[in-house]
Amino acid sequence: MSFPKNAVLTAIFLTASFVNATAQKALPEAIAAPGETAILTLHAEGAQIYDCKTSADGALVWVFREPIATLFSDGKTVGRHYAGPTWEHIDGSAVVGQVLGTAPGQVAMDIPWLKLGVTSRRGNGVLGPATTVQRINTMGGKLNGACYKAGTYESVPYSADYVFLRKG
Amino acid sequence: MPIVRNAALALLLSSASVLSASAQTPLPDAIAAPGETVVLTLHAEGAQIYECKAGADGKLAWAFREPTAALLLDGKTVGRHYAGPNWEHTDSSAVVGKAIGNAPGATANDIPWLKLTVTSGRGTGILSGVTTVQRINTAGGKLEGDCDKAGTYRNAPYSADYVFLRKG
């Protein structure tokens, strides 16, 4: 009985370190956060919202407006991601970030991986100590090219993982 | 000059009444709210999130999980729509609804139009006192069919207008 239990436990630890390794080891330098410790990783499902706007040369093009996503952990909805960019946990803690570095997504349809520095925070909870947010494992979300009517919107579905880190 | 101004005003007024007419006149009986007054109409851009789950027959199929959308008014982001279903205004007023009627969308890819009754509210603001929410002018958001792995998610982008009404 103790053998299978240990085997299961080992499998869990192995899985955990694999997940951790893919999240951390493979990160491009531009979005790495050396010396910082991951507090929490949340999966995001949602959309990147674009606005049809006139560019400097007078052409109508899609311009990124804001993200909207649900944040998941272990199959539970634990927060929301929206304009700011803001990440808000249901425990009441929230952070706002500013982009410090980017790296290309896996394919042309994927929005870039990002490193963001936390510029403000509110509430008390799990996100409270976060100083850096990484957006990794992006899928979808990109929209380029011409549009036809200024002021119209387009939502492009995406998913990603957000890693919240603290200094030290 | 006054003629031009009046013409512009007339155009504004007539487009406003056309908009109002298209929002109200053709509503199917199942989602109509006779005797109620429109408080506010917000445009939503976002995604309907689906989860891969085993159905009653044991087959894996996409099941609707929750919405995530930004609420927009005159080009400004004024709130968010998320699981509950919740509609939350940036003035902090929010309502939660429960579907009590539906009507098909314009095409097979569009989620249904809905009538929801407000079951709870919080905060004080423009959504306070709202008793009914209608989801109209839906585009996209539908996802049907088989999936391969339980617990995976998929997003279907959608847009809609949410009409908030109060009794009397």
Image (cartoon, coloured by chain):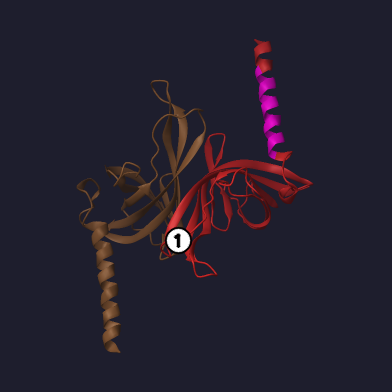
* Chain coloured red: B
The x, y position of residue B12, in whole percent, is 66, 24
Answer above or below: position of A31 versus B23. below
Q: Is residue B20 left or right of residue A132?
A: right
Q: Which residues are magenta?
A: B8-23
For residue B38, which quarter of the picture?
top right
Answer above or below: position of B86 versus B19. below
The x, y position of residue B156, in whole percent, is 49, 49
Residue A89 visible (yes or no): no
The residue that label 1 is drawn on is A78
The x, y position of residue B73, in whole percent, is 57, 38
| Quadrant where the N terminus of chain B is found in the figure | top right
User: Element type at marker 1?
Assistant: strand
What's the colour of chain A in the image? brown
| Residue at the spot 29% in from the left edge and 84% down from the top edge | A4
| Residue at the spot 49% in from the left edge and 54% down from the top edge | B49
Disc 1 residue type (three-letter): Val
Residue B16 magenta-highlighted: yes
